[in-house]
Amino acid sequence: MNIPLLNLLPTQEKQALLNKIANEKAIHFIILITFLFILFLLFLFGLKLSLKENKNIILKQIKAIESNSFITKIKNNENKITTFNKILNKISTINLNSSILIEHLYQLASITPEGIVFESLSISDKKVNLTGLAKSRQILKDFKTLIEKNLAAKDKEIMFPLSNFEAPEDINFSISYFFD
């Protein structure tokens, strides 16, 4: 219930009372603003601490990423090493094959009679293609026989065209055979 109050105070005191109430309200307002300002400062301080903590977390994550990039570099190097090892295996296979080829070429050179001159020689997949010049039919026939006995695979046929025997001397020939 609100009971109306009669103010019977003189005007000066009335004015002084109103000034006192206004001053108290201003003080309350200033206290409230100060309190809100302090809360705002506490909020900013908490935010700063939170950001600092987030910064530390982010720095840790960056270090983890950098270490992961280190791991990535290691994996890339492992891949390069694996590729290099595969290449080395191929090279060693080539060396093994080349030693077989060298041995075969040595045998071919050792059985080649006088009067046979090679113009071209190609070897692929254990197939030899020879072209050249023979002094006579007999030398060419003897050479074919030596290849059959010493170099050619026993289960494969030697390709020796009849055109090799068209001329009696200075015969251009071609021979193809497989070897083991």
Image: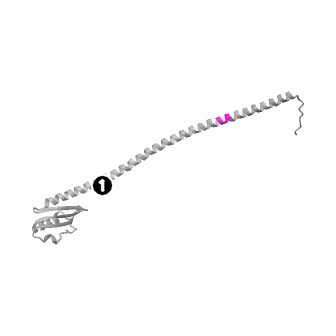
* Main SS, magenta residues: helix
User: Residue at the location (20% across, 56% down)?
Assistant: 102
Q: In which quarter of the image is the N terminus?
A: top right
The magenta segment: 37-41
Q: In which quarter of the image is the C terminus?
A: bottom left
What percent of the width, then of the height, locates residue 150? 16, 63
Q: Which amino acid does label 1 sit on?
A: Lys
What percent of the width, then of the height, locates residue 103? 19, 57
Residue 38 lies within the magenta run:
yes
Residue 70 lies within the magenta run:
no
Specify whether 54 is left or right of 125.
right
Specify whether 54 is left or right of 163.
right
Q: Name the residue nearer the viewer: 97 or 11.
A: 11
Q: Name the residue under label 1.
A: 90
Q: Name the residue nearer the viewer: 58 or 31.
A: 31
Way the structure is coloured: one colour
What percent of the width, then of the height, locates residue 99? 22, 55
Specify whether 7 is left or right of 98.
right
Q: Name the residue nearer the viewer: 39 or 56.
A: 39
| Number of numbered discs overlaid on the protein picture | 1
User: Residue at the location (51% across, 40% down)?
Assistant: 59
Circle 1 residues within 10 Å: few <14, some 14–19, many ≥20: few
User: Residue at the location (23% across, 56% down)?
Assistant: 98
What percent of the width, then of the height, locates residue 87? 32, 53
